[in-house]
Structures are given as C-alpha cells and as structure tokens.
Image (spheres, rainbow, N blue to C red):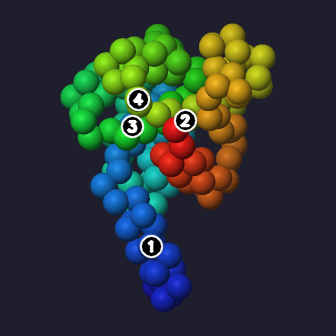
Amino acid sequence: MQSEIEKTSSQEAEEEAGDTSILVADDDDVIRGLVTTLIEKSGYSVFEAADGSEAVDKFREHRDEIDLLVFDVRMPGKDGKQAYDEIRQIRPDIKVLFISGYGSDVLEKYGVNREDFQVISKPFMPGDLISQIKTCLSGP
C-alpha cells in the first residue's frame, strides 16, 4: 500500500509530465522494458522500438505526439545516431537522450559526443534517468 507521501509524489510527477510522449529505442528487451516502466511511472507516455529502423517508423506514425527520443547508441542495423539523424530530417527540433554502456571513444565512433548530446551511461539509477529526461525536455 502506498503511503500518502508516495501518492503525492506520484501525482506531482504525472502532472509535471502532462501529456508528454517519449520514444524509447533499445535492442535489449530487458533494458527497453525497464526504461519504459521507469518513464511511465513518472507520468510520461511511451512508444517503444526494438531498433533504429523501427524507431524511425514509429516516429513517422506518431511524429506530432513524440516530444523526446531516448535511444541506445549501439543497435544492430540502424544505430541510435543514424535513427536520430533520419528523424531530424522529418522534425529538426526533436530532442534526444542517448543511452550507452560504452565509453567516450566508442560513442565518438558512432558520432555521439557528450559535448553535443545528452548521454546517460548504463548502468544508471532510475532517478538519474528521469532527471536527464526532464533536463532534455526543458532545454533548448
């Protein structure tokens, strides 16, 4: 049973999230499911994709609903950066948060550097993920 404080915190998070939708793409079903659950518990709506190609397709279907992309950097086929670049051709103002378990050298190989992009490293704490999402949504 939830305490009164937990209920209030949950209600505040949902009100803050409003009708914000996030597209999550990760080829690891467990990670994608965990990220989706954390985001939904914070009051956001989530669309899921198992890879970069599916992410682009989902974005095309829901382009006017999606406010933020949360993409794994390294996925088979079309990686997170390639999918982001393709989506930016559709909507240049879309925001992105990249997730990666790799160091800066591998990120740069994929065209993602921490100076130009918001990146959260795996493993991460749930609160850190939500904090990064809020930063991305409120930033330029």
Amino acid beneath label 4: Asp
Q: Residue under circle 3? A: 23
In the picture, measured across the screen, residue 30 lies left or right of residue 99, that is left
Q: CA distance from mark 1 to mark 4?
A: 27 Å
Mark 4 vs 3: CB contact within 8 A: no
Q: Nearer the viewer, mark 4 or mark 3?
A: 4
> Would you name the residue on which mark 2 appears?
97
Residue 13's place in the image compared with 108, above or below, is below
Choose the circle earlier in sequence order: 4 or 3: 3
Determine whether, in the image, residue 4 is placed left or right of residue 60: right
The answer to whether residue 78 is visible is yes
Question: What amino acid is labelled 3 in the image?
Answer: Leu
Upstream in the sequence, badge 3 or badge 2? 3
Q: Residue 93 bears which disc, if any?
A: 4
80 to 138, vertically: above or below: above
Does label 1 or label 4 sit earlier along the sequence? 1
Question: What amino acid type should be assigned to the residue bearing mark 2?
Answer: Leu
Q: Decide: few, some or many residues near mark 1? Use Cα within 10 Å; few <14, some 14-19, many ≥20.
A: some
Mark 3 touching mark 2, by CB under 8 A?
Answer: no
- Rendered view: 68 above or below 57: below
Whole-Å distance between the Cαs marked 4 and 3?
15 Å
The amino acid type found where label 1 is placed reads Glu
**102 or 138: nearer the eye?**
138
Nearer to me, 54 or 20: 20
Residue ID at (40%, 59%): 17
Give the residue pinned by disc 1.
12
Is residue 53 at all visible to an observer of this figure? no
